[in-house]
Amino acid sequence: MTLSRKLSDALNEQILAEMWSSNLYLSMSIHFSQLGMDGFAHWMKKQSQEELEHAYTMIDYSIKRGGQVKLEQINVVPTAFGTPLEIFEHVYEHEVHVSELIDKLVDVAAAEKDKATQDFLWGFVREQVEEEATAKNIVEKLKMYGEHHVAIMDHQLAKR
């Protein structure tokens, strides 16, 4: 079964969203690196690589299923950020947003009666549960530690 045009287009939108997310996390990594917060920078760089890997996986899947992959312009990401807590609150909100995008993509696959794509996407649904939980956990730890103990989190995040 070949991907429907509607599903192929929806996958293309998600591929761009994953690439934008990769750029967002890379921008955050650069921000932390410039502040000398190497653990935070490391964590964000890994997150950036993971998002790009998601895009690659979706591209490969779309090609296997006969979809028409079209890479379009990726919007500019922010380059100015606040405190580590504010940044990770943004990360959590962004991961919730990505979960919503993936859920909508699953809905498109269901409406198109494409069970293979639904199955493919359920892996991303499960991963988003972990992504949200991880980001929320970091937010909670930053709140608990407070701004004066941010070095503790910097050290912990370097272990990723």
Image: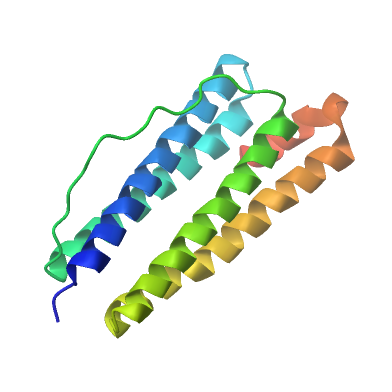
Q: Between residues 144 and 152, which one lies in front from this camera angle?
A: 144
- The colour scheme of the drawn protein is rainbow
Residue at x 87%, y 32% (from the top left corner): 146
Compared to residue 82, the image places residue 49 above or below, namely below
Q: Between residues 6 and 95, which one lies in front from this camera angle?
A: 6
Compared to residue 159, the image places residue 81 above or below, namely above
Residue at x 48%, y 42% (from the top left corner): 46
Instruction: Give how far across and how far down residue 156 sits, in percent.
Output: 70, 40
Instruction: Give how far across and how far down residue 49 sits, in percent.
Output: 40, 43
Whether residue 160 appears in this view of the structure is: no
Residue at x 13%, y 76% (from the top left corner): 2
Instruction: Give how far across and how far down residue 116 sits, in percent.
Output: 28, 81
Compared to residue 90, the image places residue 102 above or below, namely below
Residue at x 62%, y 32% (from the top left corner): 39
40 to the left or right of 61: right
Q: How many marks?
A: 0
Instruction: Give how far across and how far down residue 58 sits, in percent.
Output: 28, 59
Whether residue 21 appears in this view of the structure is: yes
111 to the left or right of 132: left
For residue 109, what is the image quadrant? bottom left
For residue 1, what is the image quadrant? bottom left
Quadrant into which the C terminus falls: top right
141 to the left or right of 84: right
For residue 59, what is the image quadrant? bottom left
